[in-house]
Amino acid sequence: MLIIIAWRNLWRHRTRSLAIITSVALGVWAGAFIVSLYYGMGNERVRIAIEQEVSHIQVHHPKFRDDHDVVFNFALDSLEAALRHTPGVKAFSLRTTVQGMLANASGSNGVQVNGVDPDAEDKTRGLKNFIINGGYFEAEKKHQVLVGKKLADKMKLAPGNKIVLTFQDIEQNITSGAFRIAGIYETANAPLDERNVYVRRGDLDELLDTPGRGTEAAVLLTDESELPAAMAALTRQLPGLEVQDWRAISPETALVMSSLDISSFIIIAIILIALAFGIVNTMLMAVLERTREIGMLMAVGMTKLRLFGMVVLETLLLTLTGCPIGFGLAWLANSWLSKKGIDLSAIAENLLKGFGYGVVIYPDLPGDKVCQIIQIVFVTALLASVFPAWKALKMRPAEAIRH
Amino acid sequence: MKTTVIDIHNVSKIYNPDTIPVHAVNGVHLHIERGEFTALVGPSGSGKTTLLNIIGGLDVPTEGKVVINDTDITALSPNRLIQFRLHNIGFVFQSFNLIPVLTASENVEFIMLLQGAPKAERERRVKELMHAVGLSDKMDVRPAQLSGGQQQRVAVARALASKPQFILADEPTANLDSQSATNLLDMMAQLNREEGMTFIFSTHDARVIERARRVITLVDGRIASDTASVSVA
Ligand SMILES: Nc1ncnc2c1ncn2[C@@H]1O[C@H](COP(=O)(O)OP(=O)(O)OP(=O)(O)O)[C@@H](O)[C@H]1O
Ligand SMILES: [Mg+2]
């Protein structure tokens, strides 16, 4: 019956309660929306990182991590065999990478030269899709290079231009080769676009004298869920090599999710602290204007514990009633927006690309985030109820009745 | 055979002892027997409410003690006192007796719920009591839809529901028109006669006073007179 009393008490001041319920609903909606926006951004960032940048797994020589030197290479044939027999592998790209310099008549720029198999690289990272000017590698042409848009803009490069790539071979001899730009690519991650140029692995092997060898294998899986099994299988099959998942290769990407978690938590907390003042105020009014009634309740035998419980219950009902409404609104907004996505290209295209984020965000609110928000709201309501409930407890029946 | 239900022993109450002391009740000795129908009268400010509150354990006396059926309630801890009130004392106040969000019958049931009575018994007694106070047709009506007299009847039913030792009523008719006041008094007198319920009520109303079988008059916190009346209730 305490619940009945608490619930009906809510509706004694319909407008006042509705105002609080509405503000909680709006607060939850705003909080849920921000969380889903952040989560959508984070998801998109991770998706881009995996599908377009680092793939799920990379394999290197153990020393390559500290020193990206081409001397830390390994034979590709056994690796290729291992990859072909690992379940869950969707595609993989074997690369030879070397740090070097790109130069043309007007200047030079430090780059990482990636020697790739055009087909494999496209299957693993979809490189072909990023060509915005010119074309992808053509089968019959040798010494072609793809450069990123950022670098092309900086050095005023266009398809058909000739450039020279200079680097050290495995004997530490400076070597260079002339390449013709086949196309300009642009990914979501502009800083990476500036650093990386792509050539055929065969062309690079000739210059470096590394036939049949490479420095990196990037592995795309059919799904994130295959990762643990694939990691285990590859680690077992490639004893001399270092097998790392995307979290290890790109810790900043893994960090994105947790930092977005923290910032969305802070925003929700701020929203709820603001709401808490309204809730405390309303409940205080509700308690004080019922002084005589509370005095009567204590007189006829309502214990302090029950009285406390009644006020807490009323506060919880007042607060939590707004929750489903807020989530309902959030769900409606999300199901509409997640189909279309939120296109931020008009306001923040360069900003987002500069940090490797997608321009279109698909809000997403996973179940555990909903639970988290409900928990925060619940705790807020509990905290907000303490002061009014304590006020009620402090009343003395004889005085409250005379009030 | 007479049994003493309430033994008030040398009770005094001083409000604001440190600033401007008010001697609201002054050395009162009083015995209330089971089955009494007693009126507490006296001019405004004479200490009626204060004395009733002390008897009911809503207020603590500055001096003296109140013994109810062998329990010295002035020695009980606040929480024990609440429990004691719940099981032993029925209250009817001048106003704000009922929980406005509960229906008449829910208000009556509420007390039994606090006492932990089983559902079947609660339902049976609610019907019985609502019938006893003549409001069988108002079971599901909220207090706001009841007249002042009807509300006080529900309050009496609520007070009876806990099967108390006695019922204290502080000016129960003060907000009622004379017809409703008479009806309420008739009903209380009937419960007193037929069920033997002990009533102590304060009042200013001459017509109410003449229904009482014992009239205690307070003046300045002291008992000025204590007379048994022969009038038939
Ligand atoms: N909380 C309090 N603080 C100080 N003085 C009080 C307090 N309550 C009552 N008094 C004083 O105690 C005296 C007795 O008051 P009480 O209310 O018991 O009288 P009463 O007989 O019930 O009066 P009434 O007929 O007006 O209800 C009065 O002088 C009153 O002003
Ligand atoms: Mg009074």
Image: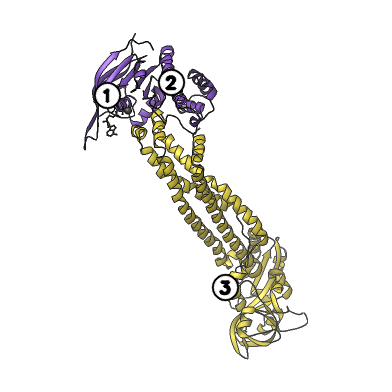
**Relative height, residue A358 to residue A111 (above, below):** above
**Distance in Å between CA atoms under marks 1 and 2:** 38 Å
Report ligand 2 position as a quadrant.
top left
- Helix or strand or loop: what does disc 3 sit on? loop
State the residue lying farthest toward the bottom.
A105
Q: Quadrant of residue B140?
A: top right
* Foreground pick, A117 / A353: A353
Q: Earlier in the sequence, mark 1 or mark 2?
A: 1
* Foreground pick, B169 / B122: B169
Q: Position of residue A86 (x, y in %)?
A: 70, 62
**Distance in Å between CA atoms under marks 3 and 2:** 103 Å
Chain whose colour in the figure is yellow: A
> For the residues tagged 3 and 2, is the chain the same?
no
Chain whose colour in the figure is purple: B
Residue depth check, mark 1 versus mark 2: number of the one nearer the observer: 2
The CB of the residue at mark 1 lies under 8 Å from ligand 1 = no
- Say if residue A63 shows up in the picture: yes
Look at label 2 and name its amino acid.
Gln
- Helix or strand or loop: what does disc 2 sit on? helix
Q: Position of residue B124 (x, y in %)?
A: 53, 20
Q: Chain of mark 2?
A: B
- Lateral position of residue B24 relative to residue A10, left or right: left
Q: Residues within 10 Å of mark 1 (few under 14, many from 20)?
A: many
**Pointer 2: what residue?**
B179
**Pointer 3: what residue?**
A63
- Helix or strand or loop: what does disc 1 sit on? strand
**Pointer 1: what residue?**
B65
